[in-house]
Image (tube, helix red, strand yellow):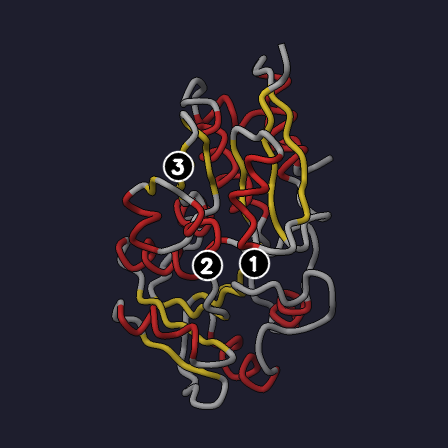
C-alpha cells in the first residue's frame, strides 16, 4: 500500500521546515504518510499541480495563499471570511480549504502581556487572516503597506490602514513583520526611518519568518526590545494542519510532542 502524500507549495520553499515537522510526526504517531516540498512558481496552476502530484493535502505559503483560496471547492467559514487558505485537504475529489495561520499566530503571541495595539507591516494573505482573528480577539490592529492596492480589503473590514507615504507614527504595543523581507536578503519590511519612530515605544517585535534573526529583529534588539520569530507560529499552525490531514485522529498535544522536535534539529 502506497503512502498518503502531502506537500508544501510556495516560492521560495527550500527553507521550509514543514516537511521535517510533518514527517517526524507521521513516523512517531504511526501514520503512513510522506510530506515533501514543491516549488510552485505559478499560483494559478495550484489545483492542477495538486492533482498531478496525487496529493491528499498541502500547506501553502507565500505568495500563493489567495490562489489557494481560489483553488478550493469548499471553504471553511473562517477561510471564507478572510479570503486566504494555507491548508488544503482532498476529500472525494474536492479540495477543502482551511486557514490555520491565524489561530496558530494568536496562540503564539498570547504570551506577550498587556498587548492591545498591533501594527502589521505588510498586507498579504497571512496579514488578512491574522488581522481578522486578532480583531475578533479584542486587539486593535493597524496595517502599513508599501502601496494602497492591497489595503482595500482591510479598509472594508474597518482597520486603520496606511502606506509608507501617508503613515502617521504612534505608539503600538506589538509590531509584526508580515512580509518576506529578510527571508533571503537583508531588506527591512518598510523604510528604516518609519521603524525608528515606532520600535522605541513598542513592547515587543515579532517576525513571521522563522529560523533566522532578520534585519527587522536585529533592529528591534538594538532598542532592547523582546523579539520572537515565526517558529511558534509555524509549529502551532502546523499542528492544526496535521489535525486536518489526519482527520483529527490525534490530540493537539500528542502532535506537538513530536513536531516541536523538528524545530531544534
Q: Which mark is residue 63?
A: 1
- Residue that mark 3 sits on: 96
User: How far apart are the two marked residues, 3 and 2, measured between alpha carbons?
Assistant: 17 Å
SS at badge 2: helix
- Circle 2 residues within 10 Å: few <14, some 14–19, many ≥20: many
Task: Tell me residue 38's x, y (percent).
Answer: 67, 43
9, above or below 195, in the image: above
Q: Return the disc, 1 or 2, that comes first in the chain's sequence.
A: 1
101, above or below 248, in the image: below
Q: Return the disc, 3 or 2, that comes first in the chain's sequence.
A: 3
User: How far apart are the two marked residues, 1 and 2, measured between alpha carbons?
Assistant: 8 Å
- In the picture as drawn, the residue positioned furthest to the bottom comes out as 165
Cβ–Cβ under 8 Å for marks 1 and 2: yes
Looking at the image, which residue is at 37% across and 77% down? Answer: 161
Looking at the image, which residue is at 30% across and 71% down? Answer: 159
State which quarter of the image contains the N terminus.
top right
Amino acid at each position: 500500500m502506497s503512502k498518503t502524500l502531502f506537500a508544501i507549495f510556495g516560492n521560495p520553499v527550500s527553507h521550509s521546515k514543514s516537511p521535517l515537522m510533518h514527517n517526524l510526526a507521521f513516523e512517531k504517531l504511526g501514520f503512513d504518510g510522506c510530506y515533501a516540498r514543491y516549488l510552485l512558481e505559478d499560483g494559478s496552476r495550484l489545483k492542477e499541480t495538486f492533482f498531478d502530484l496525487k496529493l491528499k493535502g498541502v500547506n501553502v505559503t507565500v505568495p500563493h495563499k489567495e490562489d489557494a483560496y481560489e483553488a478550493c471547492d469548499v471553504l471553511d467559514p473562517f477561510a471564507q471570511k478572510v479570503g486566504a487558505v494555507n491548508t488544503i485537504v482532498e476529500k472525494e475529489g474536492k479540495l477543502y480549504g482551511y486557514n490555520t495561520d491565524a489561530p496558530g499566530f494568536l496562540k503564539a503571541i498570547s504570551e506577550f502581556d498587556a498587548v492591545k495595539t498591533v501594527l502589521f507591516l505588510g498586507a498579504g494573505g497571512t496579514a488578512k487572516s491574522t488581522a481578522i482573528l486578532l480583531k475578533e480577539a479584542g486587539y486593535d490592529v493597524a496595517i502599513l503597506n508599501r502601496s494602497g492596492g492591497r489595503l482595500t480589503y482591510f479598509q472594508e473590514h474597518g482597520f486603520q490602514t496606511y502606506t509608507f507615504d501617508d503613515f502617521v507614527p504612534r505608539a503600538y504595543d506589538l509590531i509584526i513583520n508580515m512580509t518576506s523581507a529578510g527571508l533571503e536578503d537583508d531588506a527591512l519590511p518598510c523604510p528604516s526611518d518609519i521603524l525608528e519612530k515606532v520600535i522605541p515605544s513598542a513592547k515587543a517585535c515579532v517576525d513571521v519568518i522563522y529560523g533566522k534573526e532578520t534585519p527587522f529583529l536585529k533592529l528591534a534588539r538594538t532598542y532592547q526590545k523582546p523579539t520572537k520569530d515565526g517558529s511558534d507560529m509555524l509549529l502551532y499552525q502546523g499542528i492544526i494542519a496535521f489535525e486536518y490531514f489526519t482527520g483529527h485522529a490525534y490530540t493537539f498535544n500528542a502532535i506537538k510532542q513530536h513536531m516541536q522536535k523538528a524545530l531544534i534539529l
